[in-house]
Amino acid sequence: MADLITFVLIGLYFVVLIGIGSWASKKIHNTEDYILAGRSLGFWVFTILIICSVCSGMTLLGVSGFGYSSGWPGIWEQIFVPLAASFCIIVFGVKLHAVGKERGYMTVQDYLADRFESPRALRGLSAVSGIIVSLVYLVGQYTAISIVLVWLFGIPHWEALLISGVIITAYTVVGGLYAVSWTTLIQGGILILGVFLMAPFVIVSAGGLSHINTVLAGVDPNFVEPWFPSPAYAPYAFATPEFLVSFGILLMVGLACAPHVINNVLAAKEARYFKWAPLVAFGIYGVVMFLVKFTGFAVRSLVEEGTIVLPATVNAQDFAFISGVEYAMPNVALWALFAVIVLAAVMSTTDRLMLTVGTMFAWDIYKNILRPSAPDKEVLLVSKVAVVVAAGSTLWLAINPPPMLAWLIWMGIGVMLATFAVPLLAGLYWRGATKEGAIASMGLGLVAATVFGYWHQFVAPLPVHFSLYALVISALTMVVVSLVTASNSRDALDNTQTGWFIQSP
């Protein structure tokens, strides 16, 4: 579908991103500038960064694809995901920002090492775990970007991956979080405005929600119910009541504690941002998510009526939003604008994930474990090299994407939930949580998530999301091991403001 206008607009968009990276590189004088943008993010840059770190390639492609394949039972996602941004800011952010600013934390691993008095073991385990889950999540992001570029230019999948990888890696490597945060502000604005402008046209073109619901009910009466009956009677009918409980925990808590999301709270300039940011983030992102899901419904209606046909691919439902806009807005200039909107959505999380991988390897593993004497310039260099390696490895893995983009992204979130949620929540709020408990909880959570995830995907479907089983194992392990091991020192607990409060009294 690409024409001269599309090429020019996409090219201009990429030039702007590279330009921001070049500008940001001049602001980087030390590791703190690269990792945390000098702790200088203002309210809107911080809030949009949180939203876009949560939203990912799932927002336009995965959410609309989920709506296309599952109907109204999947609507709960539109509440759970925006709640993740609010949960992160309130439950984790308020306390971590205060302690992090006072004690100079660069990453959430700094907090875990300090709180549990484990500068090597727990730091190393959490960094390795964070890198693993971030790489899994990154594969999903690159798959989403490739879908857009293949659609736009009709190029092979591997060429689309290479183009996207080079562009994102370039501005992330040179500009660090300064580049990521400011490109994300632009990308977030494009995404929000684009969805507000384009989604209603697709919904109206399908006859409005009332007509859409009639068509969906004709396909399967349960498509217009709040959930599917249990047990699941078809592969698409997995959103049963018990699954939705696990789904809510997965999205709300798992996304909130993801390293690429939670690290953003350390970069906010002022603590007062945490008062209104949760509400603003939830409101903006909630509206965007509902509009995208309704677009998925609309496209399913159009397909069922024979009006449009999705591409004949294994992940056809992930093309729902693209196909809907192509039908409802048959204007080449608008297609070019839409292409930028989709790219903005998927790139806004990809760059943050890549920077997170580089940070965890360079700061937490290289600087704090392997080579404590490494000077600042060396740590910066290692971080940039790690970003490039992360990009290359995930691009290679993304060459053969799974049938459903949403599944891959949920897999990454599930491992994050099972690995990080319990050590973080227990560390922040339970003074009885011990170093041994945290290490065992995180380690077994990672192993259990891998086992249950594999079982669900390749052996037999589970009635709830696999991460719930791993989360329960992680929580029980934390409690049992902490009760039989020595507690951390009073100084460590006091210095990290551990206790049953969000804001220090």
Image (cartoon, rainbow, N blue to C red):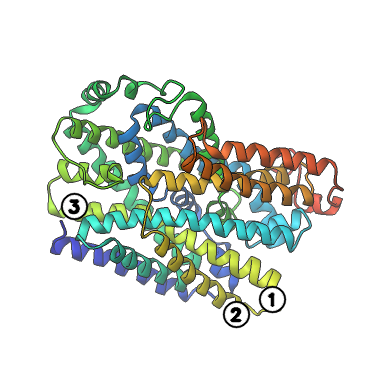
Image quadrant occupied by the N terminus: bottom left
Which mark is in front, 3 or 1?
1
Q: How many marks?
A: 3
Helix, strand or loop at mark 3: helix
The x, y position of residue 287, in whole percent, is 37, 37
The residue wearing badge 1 is 371
Which mark is in front, 2 or 1?
1
Marks 2 and 1, how far apart in space?
A: 10 Å
Residue occupying the point 40% across, 74% down: 22
Amino acid on which the number 1 mark rests in the picture = Arg
Asked if residue 238 is positioned above or below residue 324 in the image, the reply reads: above
Marks 3 and 2, how far apart in space?
A: 44 Å
Amino acid on which the number 2 mark rests in the picture = Glu
- The answer to whether one can see residue 164 in this image is yes
Amino acid on which the number 3 mark rests in the picture = Trp
The residue wearing badge 3 is 335
Q: Earlier in the sequence, mark 3 or mark 1?
A: 3
